[in-house]
Amino acid sequence: MRTALTPEQINEYRGNGFLFFPDLLTADEVGELETAVLEAISTMGKNKIADGLEWLEGDGFYDKVFTQRLNLWRINDTVKRYTRATGLGQMAARLAGVDAMRIWCDQALIKGPFANPTAYHLDNPFWSFHSHDSISVWIALDDATLENGCLWFLPGSHKMAGFEVTPIGMDMNGIFETYPQMTGIDPVPVPMKAGDCGFHNGLVAHGAGPNMTRGRRMAMTAAFMPDGSTFNGEQNILPNDYFNSLAPGDPLDNDNQNPLV
Ligand SMILES: O=C(O)CCC(=O)C(=O)O
Ligand SMILES: [Fe+2]
């Protein structure tokens, strides 16, 4: 894993709210991670969250946006070696400008042939903490192209965003009803080769096109929460026992659920 960041890359991330980072993984590493992710997913059936809250895949529009499987690090040591890699966590912390990160979740996002588009949305409002400094890494395990549903971003939108949820539904323009100030921004596509990755701020608007091809567009992602973040009352993916033990304002510092990376 290539983890060196330049000051220019950090500036670009902070200005745009995202950063394209080529060659994070070698071809061998891509193969190893891909195999591990598919292995982990094959044990989960329709359950979207490994070893935690039950969330079953259905057959509605959202289930055809991508195959989504979360917290694979909990059931697969190889996935854990990548998504909880210290070097990756350090990159996330440097880009965000915080001292330390905890893993919020990792997730595989696989657009199968002819998958639906991923509507523009913000990530952080879905989660159980609010932060201007949360960050995800999206690692391409297949080439992600304009044809098969690469990511698109609204550069700088993280500076205009609040914490209102914008659903990943059927309306591509839904986000602009909540955040009309973002309508003036030109969206930017970020195609990637397998092994490249992108980092994005939890408040930057992003989405992906449909998969117009017969091929697969597979990504492995990890979302990082700044250490010191506090519970906002949303359950999101927290297991019931832990969720019921929390009151708004409590620190989310459970090393089993959200370990430091
Ligand atoms: O892979 C996709 O289509 C969407 C990814 C995304 O929204 C994310 O990683 O936050
Ligand atoms: Fe997202």
Image (tube, rainbow, N blue to C red):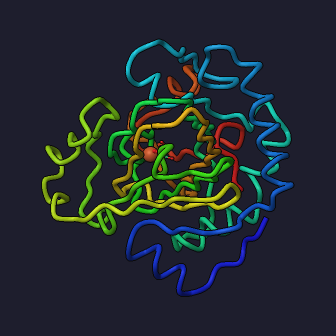
Question: For this view, does 154 lie left or right of residue 30?
Answer: left
Q: Residue at x 38, y 76 (%)?
A: 15
Q: How far across and down, in percent of the image, does residue 124 sit?
A: 41, 48
In the rendered image of this protein, does residue 43 appear above or below residue 148? above
Q: Residue at x 76, y 70 (%)?
A: 2
In the rendered image of this protein, does residue 151 appear above or below residue 46? below
Question: For this view, does 122 lie left or right of residue 190?
Answer: left
Q: Residue at x 54, y 14 (%)?
A: 56
User: Can you name the residue that lies furthest to the front here?
Assistant: 214
Q: Nearer the viewer, residue 105 or 157?
A: 157
Image quadrant where one finds the C terminus: bottom right
In the rendered image of this protein, does residue 12 appear above or below residue 172? below
Q: Nearer the viewer, residue 45 or 97?
A: 45
User: Can you name the residue that lies furthest to the bottom here?
Assistant: 7
Image quadrant where one finds the N terminus: bottom right
Q: How far across and down, in percent of the image, does residue 88 sit?
A: 70, 62
Q: How far across and down, in percent of the image, does residue 153 sit?
A: 37, 59
Q: Exactly how many numbered labels are in the figure?
A: 0
In the rendered image of this protein, does residue 175 appear above or below residue 110? below
Query: In terms of image quadrants, where is residue 110?
Result: top right
Q: Residue at x 53, y 79 (%)?
A: 10
Question: For this view, does 244 lie left or right of residue 132?
Answer: right
Question: For this view, does 136 lie left or right of residue 133?
Answer: right
Q: How far across and down, in percent of the image, does residue 247 sit?
A: 43, 34
